[in-house]
Image (tube, rainbow, N blue to C red):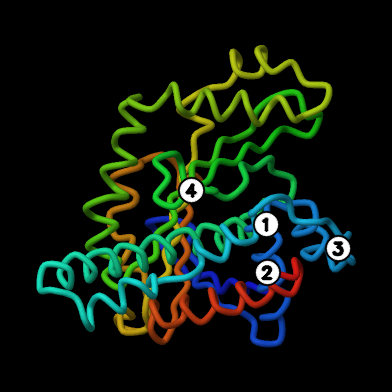
Amino acid sequence: MPILLQPASSTECRFSEWSIIAKDRKRLVAILAFLYLRQEENAQRVINSLEPKWRASKGKVAQNVIRKLTAPNPKDVELVQSGTEAEKDAAKKRIATSIVHRDGLLFQHISWIEARKSIPSGYMTAPHVRQADKGFDGFIIELDEPKSEIKRIVICEDKASATPRKLVSSSVWPEIETILRGDRDDEILADLVTLLKGVPNIDAEAAVDEVFWEGARHFRVAVATGENRRKSGSFLHIVSGFEKVAGGSPESRVAGILPFDDVREGLAQLADEVVAKVKELTGV
């Protein structure tokens, strides 16, 4: 697996620092390219060190993928240089938004890969197709050994930010609070039923009826950020307050940080590599 986890002791949660293994970077890029192309089976084959099966890319999927991985839009860059003052201001805002959206979606894909490693038997939603999607960043169901009852439901929050502590405090913790209040129970139920439909020989309705909602619900927070956010040799401060906000047992709270020398530059470079791989796979 191209992502290495270094666990660290914490009372807040099960915490680990992530890193991309240099010698496996090309493998990571290939997995990401297949995921973006909606070829999850091929992504899993690369994860399992198996040869992917060739599949033709349908319609303009490859072109759409390349567009989502490309930020900023060259037209906006040109406007910043030669447009009117109003055009320049609008273009600068679009550039900033496009970079945030590209990085957020790319990190969701990276986080999916790590989750597949950490919970190999879990049933997971695929990474989002749309940028800035309002659904859960990730959703995982783990079943008991007979695969008849739900063991846990993992709700994932994935963020890429140059100011991660501010984002976690203002966005992630309030989001978890809304979930704990039950404000999104219908959305959780919808994802739960959708995933269970793909599990053979399980009575989906019975499994949903019997699950202990509060006890089975776990949270996983993953953040990509810059090395400049490390304090006293650690990134634990980014998820300070996790226990207070989410409650539950320590096992029900998981957090991971993927640091880059510069988070925006690091994700931009990775996006360029995935674009090149997408072009190689599809001939676009």
CB-based contact (under 8 Å), mark 1 and mark 2: yes
Residue 66 location (% of width, % of height): 56, 66
The amino acid on which the numbered mark 4 sits, given as a three-letter code, is Arg
- Relative depth, front residue between 136 and 254: 136
Q: Circle 4 is placed at which residue position?
A: 130
Determine the secondary structure under disc 3: loop
Q: Circle 3 is placed at which residue position?
A: 52
For marks 1 and 2, the one nearer the N-term is 1
The amino acid on which the numbered mark 1 sits, given as a three-letter code, is Leu
CB-based contact (under 8 Å), mark 3 and mark 2: no
**Residues at marks 4 and 1, CA–CA distance in whole angstroms:** 13 Å
Q: Which mark is residue 278?
A: 2
CB-based contact (under 8 Å), mark 1 and mark 3: no
For marks 2 and 4, the one nearer the N-term is 4
Residue 215 location (% of width, % of height): 50, 30
Q: Residues within 10 Å of mark 1 (few under 14, many from 20)?
A: many
